[in-house]
Image: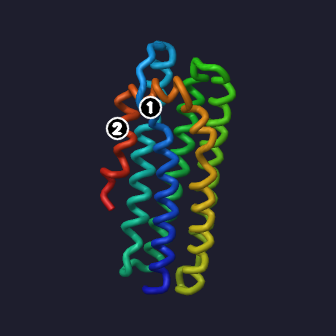
Amino acid sequence: MEGTNPVNKKLAVALSGGAVLVLALTGCGGSDDNEKLDSWAKEVCEGVQPQAKKIAAANAAIQKETSDSSTPAEVQKTDAKAFQDMSDAYKAMGATVQKAGPPDVDDGEKKQKDAVTELNGLSSSYASLRQQVEKLNTKDQAEFADGLKDIATELNKLSKSGSDALKTLEEGDVGKAMAKQPSCKSASATPSAAKG
């Protein structure tokens, strides 16, 4: 099983980069009073938190499956399920931000629209990775390892490119409002709580 292990580890590392994206949705510090914005932040945080947990759990599952004893078939099954879970979670986050409407800030509508587009794009990307994993040949160790390498490369790109619109959405007052929400605070604690 030695052949796929280093690749699996790469996959796990690439995935943990993806988790950072979710944590972009947590804001930090500040306490200006804007009830409309606070209400928006509460809705978004409460909708995002369960999805952040789902993504952290999917990351943890992939990292757990990267042990030497895992067969390609086991890795394939776990990865496919994890990618599907991530796809669903990002789609749900996009729906949450969409439903919450634009935040009550300058350019709120554009920021909201960009974030929804980005989250839906991530959802599609993870669905596509699931399809790629499912097509890998688990009977041939070397071929499987090569296929995983390609997927790890894609994941790396995803984790680097994914969070610009989310960061923009959370700049300034939006970030301050989100930082006050208990559900956003607990979302940021999720990955450390995930069992690896």
Image check: 60 left or right of 13?
left
Q: Quadrant of the C terminus?
A: bottom left
* Whether residue 196 is visible: yes
Which sits in the foreground, 70 or 184? 184
**Amino acid of disc 2:** Ser
Asked which quadrant contains residue 74, the reply is bottom left
**Amino acid of disc 1:** Cys
First reached walking from the N terminus: tag 2 or tag 1:
1
- Badge 1: residue crowd in 10 Å (few <14, some 14–19, many ≥20): many
Image check: 183 left or right of 113?
left
**Residue shown at the point (33%, 54%) measured from the top left:** 194
Q: Horizontal and vertical percent for residue 55?
A: 45, 50
- Name above or below for residue 13 compared with residue 147: above
The residue indicated by pointer 1 is 45
Q: Horizontal and vertical percent for residue 168?
A: 61, 35
**Residue shown at the point (39%, 40%) measured from the top left:** 187
Q: Are marks 2 and 1 in contact (CB under 8 Å)?
A: no
- SS of the residue under disc 2: helix
**Residue shown at the point (47%, 25%) measured from the top left:** 41
**Residue shown at the point (43%, 33%) measured from the top left:** 28
Q: Horizontal and vertical percent for residue 120?
A: 63, 43
Asked which quadrant contains residue 67, the reply is bottom left
* Whether residue 46 is visible: no
Q: Quadrant of the N terminus?
A: bottom left
- SS of the residue under disc 1: helix
- Name above or below for residue 78 compared with residue 149: above
The residue indicated by pointer 2 is 186
**Color encoding of the figure:** rainbow
